[in-house]
Amino acid sequence: MTVTRFAPSPTGYIHVGNLRTALMNFLIARKESGTFILRIDDTDPERSKEEYVDAIKQDLEWLGLTWDRVERQSARLDRYAAAADKLRDMGRFYEAFETPTELDLKRKKQLNMGKPPVYDRAALSLSEAEQEALRAERGAGVWRFKLNQERIEWTDGILGDVSIDAASVSDPVLIRGDGQVLYTLASVVDDTEMGVTHVVRGSDHVTNTATQIQIIEALGGNVPRFAHHSLLTGPQGESLSKRLGTLSLRDLRAAGVEPMALLSLMARLGSADPIELRSEMEQLIEGFDIERFGAAPTKFDSNDLYPLTARHLQSLPFEAVEEHVRATGVPADLGPLFWEVTRENITTLRDLEAWWLMCRDGAQPVIEDEDREFVAEAMALLPEGPYDRDSWGSWTTAVKDATGRKGRALFMPLRKALTGQAHGPDMNKLLPLLQNIRAKG
Ligand code: GLU
């Protein structure tokens, strides 16, 4: 049985980078009819906030990334304590007392000597009396996991065969001096006890994975299949880390990006397959294959979301947007026609409002000097509303007969006079929607 999880820390809003992780784990679980767990990594009581937990859920719900259950690390502290005891009993866990400044100094010395800045395990040679003395002086130490210094190897779903020399990695701190359990341990205990079979996460976690594999093995758990996706960069390959804050899912939602546009892009970006706009989650699930993704950094341009959003909206029947059209203020009887007329002329649903205000209040007419007389003459021929789908045709025929103008010279000044714009919806359909016409010449 396939079990995956998305494990955000509730310390902020989730962004497109997190979405990539969430979506891949979701798609794997759904493709295999497995379980998708939303795991809240909230062992840090200072930085974790309930409002972010709620926000993460809302964002995932907006996208239709439904989870089968929620787990919270803060509710499982006893499990982590039990695992820590087990590691202690096995002699794989040791207390270390260096201050951050001391560690920093050690690192600098190592680097100066051209050595990798790996923790020197000085704490392992402390006698019990020395430990006691340090504890009395500095308080409880941190607890480090003692890595077996051998190569750690796994076949990564995206990176292929990975081999990391454990001797080049510091023994990871799993418990802080104040007793706070750190992510590395909590995550391993959860993955093992929850039967997680596949873990997809960002390539910034590759070294974590190496150490976690040893911890899982020490605890006697099954090692899940790991896949590390590349990190997103901006369109020019620049780092996105600083800009990710502006690429939160809630900002994209507020900007009018449609869920299926975002999901369609993210389900393929960085893979060997082309981006295809899908209208159903099922199609994304069907077409997903983690092995098609590459290790190279993936360029993300939020501008790509808008053409996809526009295309998605064009494909929607009125029923799908009825609520939104109504909320825009369009009277119920005009709704279907309004949608038919505007859907090809919007990028996001937010653009509906401007079209509606134009229909309701009339546009600021645009009339070129050389058309002034012509427009005045035409407006005099415009019958009183309400209009139907034949009104534009019969009116422009009458104007043509009266003025001799035809083609573009006939239609364009009238369009600009009525809508204030040179481009826009089919006038046959638009005219019946115009509640108010201001272009009296
Ligand atoms: N809370 C971790 C993070 O957000 C989870 C990483 C993982 O998937 O194991 O980076």
Image (cartoon, grey):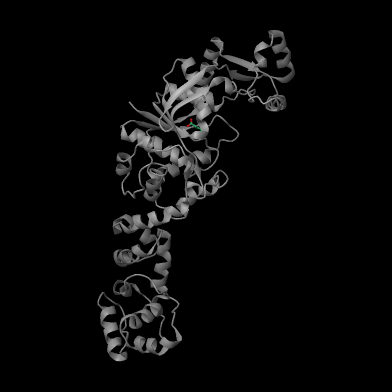
- Quadrant location of residue 33? top left
> Against 331, is 274 above or below?
above
Specify the quadrant that holds the C terminus: bottom left
Please tell me which residue is depicted at 32% across the width and 84% down the height of the picture.
Answer: 382
> Against 17, is 320 above or below?
below
Q: Picture coordinates of residue 178 (x, y %)?
A: 64, 24
Q: Is residue 324 left or right of residue 206?
A: left
Please tell me which residue is depicted at 50% across the width and 23% down the height of the picture.
Answer: 212
Q: Picture coordinates of residue 430 (x, y %)?
A: 33, 72
Q: Picture coordinates of residue 419 (x, y %)?
A: 40, 75
Specify the quadrant that holds the N terminus: top left
Please tell me which residue is depicted at 61% across the width and 19% down the height of the picture.
Answer: 143
Furthest-front residue in this view: 114
State the residue in front, 405 or 49. 405
- Quadrant location of residue 391? bottom left
State the residue in front, 42 or 34. 34
State the residue in front, 263 or 206. 206
Q: In this view, does 126 lie to the left or right of 260?
A: right
Can the viewer see residue 14?
A: no
Q: Picture coordinates of residue 300 (x, y %)?
A: 47, 47
- Quadrant location of residue 434? bottom left
Report the number of numbered marks: 0
State the residue in front, 200 or 156. 156
Can the viewer see residue 135?
A: yes
